[in-house]
Image: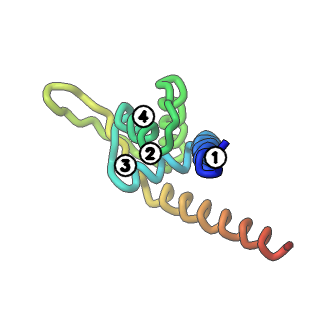
């Protein structure tokens, strides 16, 4: 296997693994960038991370994030259709910031152990 192909394979595998493990953080980050409804979150996750989310995985996650106070939702009518649009809360932003800081600290710790 060519080196470039091997690297691309590794990158894709890592991207998908990351998206599955940190799905809650990725969804919060997507919604932080721009408020979104469920179907759009599914499409953006697939486009950005190559992960195909099922409705049965996403909607319980959105509900859980809303119950925890990381997201809030509102009903919006577009072209005669009612959509539930999700916005990130200040608590959700704090959660993302904490994750970012924690991951950076963990990576720094690993770097120091060399």
Q: Secondary structure at mark 1?
A: loop
Measuring from the top left, give residue 107's x and y in whole percent.
72, 67
In this rendering, the label closer to the viewer, 1 or 4:
1
Does residue 106 lie above or below 17 as drawn?
below
Q: Which numbered dot is residue 87?
A: 3
Q: Secondary structure at mark 4?
A: helix
Outermost left residue:
79
Q: Secondary structure at mark 2?
A: helix
Q: Is residue 48 left or right of residue 76?
A: right
Outermost bottom residue:
112
Q: Which numbered dot is residue 2?
A: 1
Q: Is residue 18 visible?
A: no
In this rendering, the label closer to the viewer, 4 or 2:
2
The residue indicated by pointer 2 is 48
Does residue 68 lie above or below 98 as drawn?
above
- Determine crowd level at label 3: few under 14, some 14-19, many 20+ residues with C-alpha closer than 10 A: many
Residue occupying the point 65% across, 51% down: 3
Outermost front residue:
2
Residue occupying the point 45% across, 40% down: 45
- Determine crowd level at label 2: few under 14, some 14-19, many 20+ residues with C-alpha closer than 10 A: few
Q: Are marks 4 and 2 in contact (CB under 8 Å)?
A: no
Q: Earlier in the sequence, mark 2 or mark 3?
A: 2
Q: Earlier in the sequence, mark 1 or mark 3?
A: 1
Q: Nearer the viewer, residue 54 or 65?
A: 54
How many labels were placed on the picture?
4
Distance of label 4 from label 2 (alpha carbons): 10 Å
Q: Earlier in the sequence, mark 4 or mark 2?
A: 4
Q: Is residue 96 left or right of residue 41?
A: right
Residue occupying the point 24% across, 28% down: 82
Q: Which numbered dot is residue 42?
A: 4
């Amino acid at each position: 296997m060519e080196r470039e192909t091997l690297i691309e394979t590794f990158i894709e595998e890592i991207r998908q693994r990351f998206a599955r493990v940190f799905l809650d953080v990725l969804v919060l980050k997507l919604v932080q960038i721009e408020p979104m409804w469920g179907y759009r979150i599914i499409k953006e996750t697939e486009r950005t991370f190559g992960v195909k989310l099922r409705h049965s995985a996403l909607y319980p996650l959105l509900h859980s994030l809303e119950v925890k106070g990381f997201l809030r939702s509102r009903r919006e009518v577009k072209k005669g259709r009612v959509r539930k649009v999700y916005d990130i809360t200040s608590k959700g932003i704090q959660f993302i910031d904490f994750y970012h800081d924690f991951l950076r600290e963990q990576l720094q710790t690993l770097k120091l152990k060399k």
